[in-house]
Image: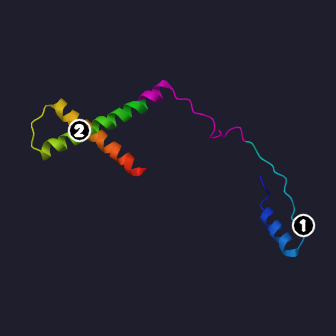
Amino acid sequence: MIKHNALEDRLNAVRTGKPIPEEPARFDINPNIQSSNTPKVLTYQQFFISEGYKLFNVLATSILYGYGIRTIFSQEWAFVGTLGVGFLLNHFLTIILKLLKK
């Protein structure tokens, strides 16, 4: 770690015309802190929880979109039909929004 007054010493040296003092590079390595380059290992439980959450989000939005379309067009679809239409609309909107972000 660099001394707390290293910048002050450098600026004063420039102001007075003296040579800039060199601070040796010192790094304190703390073994308790993990570097961001190391990949995190997921357990099976974490994997299934995150994928289940994603699946729940897709199904929930698809159902809501399906019921919305069904209501707008005053149709009488079975649940599977409502889910299918909502699923199609969900993926259509996802693709369009990804294309617009680029």
Magenta region's main secondary structure? Answer: loop
Q: Residue at x 9, y 43 (%)?
A: 74
Name the outermost residue toward the right: 18
Q: Secondary structure at mark 2?
A: helix
Q: Nearer the viewer, residue 33 or 98?
A: 98
Residue that mark 2 sits on:
86
- Horizontal side, residue 34 vs residue 63: left or right: right
- The 10 Å Cα crowd at callout 2, few under 14, some 14 to 19, many 20 or more, is many
- Which of pointers 1 and 2 lies earlier in the amino acid sequence? 1
Tell me where residue 81 appears, x and y as whole percent. 17, 32
Q: Nearer the viewer, residue 32 or 50?
A: 50
Q: Secondary structure at mark 1?
A: loop
Q: Is 23 a magenta residue?
A: no
Quick check: can you spot residue 5?
no
Task: Identify residue type, mark 1.
Answer: Pro
Quick check: can you spot residue 37?
yes
Query: For residue 73, what is the image quadrant?
Result: top left
Tell me where residue 89 appears, x and y as whole percent. 25, 41
Q: Give the magenta range.
A: 30-48
- Horizontal side, residue 22 vs residue 65: left or right: right
